[in-house]
Image: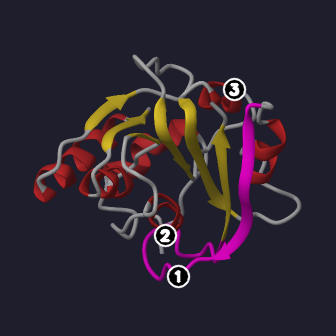
Amino acid sequence: MPEHHPDREDFGSFYAGSRKWSGNPNAALVREAGPLNPGTALDVGYGEGADVVWLAEHGWRTTGIDPVDTTLGRARALADARGVAVELRRAGVGEFVPGQPFDLVACSYLPVGPEAVAAVEQLVAPGGTLLWVHHDFGPQGRSGIISPAQVAQLLGTEFTVHTLETVNRGITHGAGAHHTRDVVLVAGRTG
């Protein structure tokens, strides 16, 4: 099973080889976004594109941002193969300035620290939903990577936490298969 390195600089070489992930959308995204009325969605760190494409297939007007050049072609090919329109941009969370905020902002497995939370908050429209998912690294956490529980503590008063839970993963292949549990945060922005 290939290992992945959490440092942003290494993701270009990490994605340069064969496909890394399962190719399936994140189970937490499917569970949490499935019942929502589709509107505009932003997938922060779209990687190989499974989540951004799933959202588009389910009626969302979807934008994806990722700072890694090599992910764009892979995600574009998946969207084209599935016949859906997605807007993909090469940008990190702090670099992206949209014309308007989004009804759903999904952040899955971002290798970012607490400084990213304020930037992500601004991307969520009033009345919108923030979904933040990461692996459960236990009480010690992972150096330099903010956990969904830490995100929940840093959110401004305009956000209400609806869900903060640890869930078992059913992933059996791909670079993340060795992670058996995820932490899922769902928060709504008042408005």
Estimate how packed mark 3 is, as few (under 14), some (14 to 19) or many (20 or more) residues with alpha carbons within 10 Å: some
Q: Toward the viewer: 124 or 135?
A: 124
Kindly identify which residue carries mark 3: 118
Distance of label 3 from label 1 (alpha carbons): 31 Å
Estimate how packed mark 2 is, as few (under 14), some (14 to 19) or many (20 or more) residues with alpha carbons within 10 Å: some
Q: Is residue 140 above or below residue 41?
A: below
- Residue drawn at (27%, 51%), measured in percent from left and top? 59
Estimate how packed mark 1 is, as few (under 14), some (14 to 19) or many (20 or more) residues with alpha carbons within 10 Å: few
Q: Toward the viewer: 127 or 184?
A: 127
Between disc 3 and disc 2, whose residue precedes? Answer: 2
Local secondary structure at mark 2 = helix
Where residue 145 appears, as percent x and y from the top left, is 71, 45
Kindly identify which residue carries mark 1: 170
Contact check, label 3 and label 2, Cβ < 8 Å: no
In the image: residue 77, left or right of residue 29:
left
User: Is residue 185 found inside the magenta-colored segment of the image?
Assistant: no
- Residue drawn at (49%, 78%), measured in percent from left and top? 171
Between disc 3 and disc 1, whose residue precedes? Answer: 3
- Residue drawn at (38%, 55%), measured in percent from left and top? 51
- In this rendering, which labeled residue sits more in front, label 2 or label 1? 2
Amino acid marked by disc 3: Ala
Kindly identify which residue carries mark 2: 27
